Amino acid sequence: MKDAIAECSLVLPYAAPISVHTKGGIVMNMHQMQPAATDSKDKVGLSVVAPVFNEEDLIRAFVERLAAVTAKLADRFDIEIVLVDDGSRDNSLQRMKSLVVEFPQLRIVELRSNTGQTAALQAGLDVANGDIVITMDSDLQHFPEDLPMFLAKIDEGWDVVCGWRHDRQEGIDRRLPSLAANWLLRRISGLTVHDIGTTFRAYRGEIVRDIRLLGESHRFIPIYAKAVGARITEVPIQNVTRPKGASNYGLMRTFNVLFDVFFLYFFVNFRDRPIRIFGWLTLVFWMIGGLIATILLGLNLIYGIPVVRDHNGWFMLSMMLILFGVLFILSGVTLEMIVRIYFSDASRSQYRLRKIWTSADFDVRK
């Protein structure tokens, strides 16, 4: 893997400084914030990040189950639970606020509008202070009780642990497209994990902070992590249909993944050297165009055939192929310059943060 990749935040960037309001009115730049100190040198910071969108019926049960699991890990970990409200239109935010006093390890990130799961997940990752970060859905299709399995794999030395929905309970309309997409993504990326798309994963903090997410790229974090040298494994997880409410995903997402595959192929093979693929395309176009032009020139010189008049279609094709080759090489050079600028700039973000809610925002004496 090229050294240039390891030296910069992973592609798809837009990392922006975020103002975080803390007790006493102090405003800190999130990129300057350091992981919170643990109570003991023996403890490791653990952050659980979950985007939330219209989950008012499930959010209390999710937090209670997650808190029960993490309470058993408190002797080893300094734990925080980061919930990102992605512009929910129901009472999800209000219900999360009501839980902060009851669960002081809870932090609520409120986004100004609905920006999508990827942006919400990135917001949570930016806020998370843990040395280990676990991401999961808040709709209870992911079981909080599976967290210890992920941590056990991290203890074994893995950098990224992916959940594997080996016994999916959704209908075939969800399972079949997922199987096809995972097979295709494995072929492109070289990964061996079965389930690349699930968001139930554990990461070492230094790995996940090297990755910037954009669009709908949260599904492909293992591919980006592999690009920065992460060691990746998987654990089988439980998976059920939603206990309540309707899924926020549709069949259109499958087609979006197919579109993303074209980018991922380019990303995996040419992200830091786009001139290579454009150079090869230029070479192919020039070879074909040059071959046609050479044959036409030979016909003209040897047999005196007026090829421009008698074979004007072939003549125009050869000129167009040569011209396209010139355009491709110029595009490659331009993209090489853009990539270098792109990698060096991490001052933008896809989301806009309104406020981070912590227990300090509430009077626990009331």
Image (cartoon, rainbow, N blue to C red):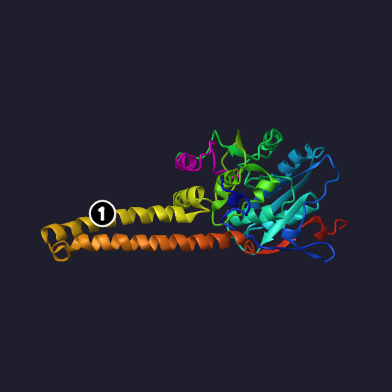
Q: Count the labels in the image.
A: 1
Q: Which residues are magenta?
A: 177-199
Front residue of this view, candidates 37 and 22: 37
The quadrant of the rendering that contains the C terminus is: bottom right
Front residue of this view, candidates 19 and 98: 19
Q: Is residue 350 magenta?
A: no
Residue 144: percent from the left, percent from the top?
68, 40
Residue 212: percent from the left, percent from the top?
61, 54
Q: In the rendered view, does 264 fall on the left or right side of 314?
A: right
Is residue 99 visible in the rendered image? The answer is no
| Residue at the (55%, 33%) spot, across then down | 166
The quadrant of the rendering that contains the N terminus is: top right
Disc 1 residue type (three-letter): Leu
- Within 10 angstroms of label 1, few (less than 14), some, or many (20 or more) residues? few
* As drawn, 256 above or below 167: below
* As drawn, 245 above or below 176: below
The residue that disc 1 covers is: 291
Residue 355: percent from the left, percent from the top?
72, 63
| Residue at the (50%, 43%) spot, across then down | 189
Q: In the rendered view, does 90 fall on the left or right side of 41?
A: left
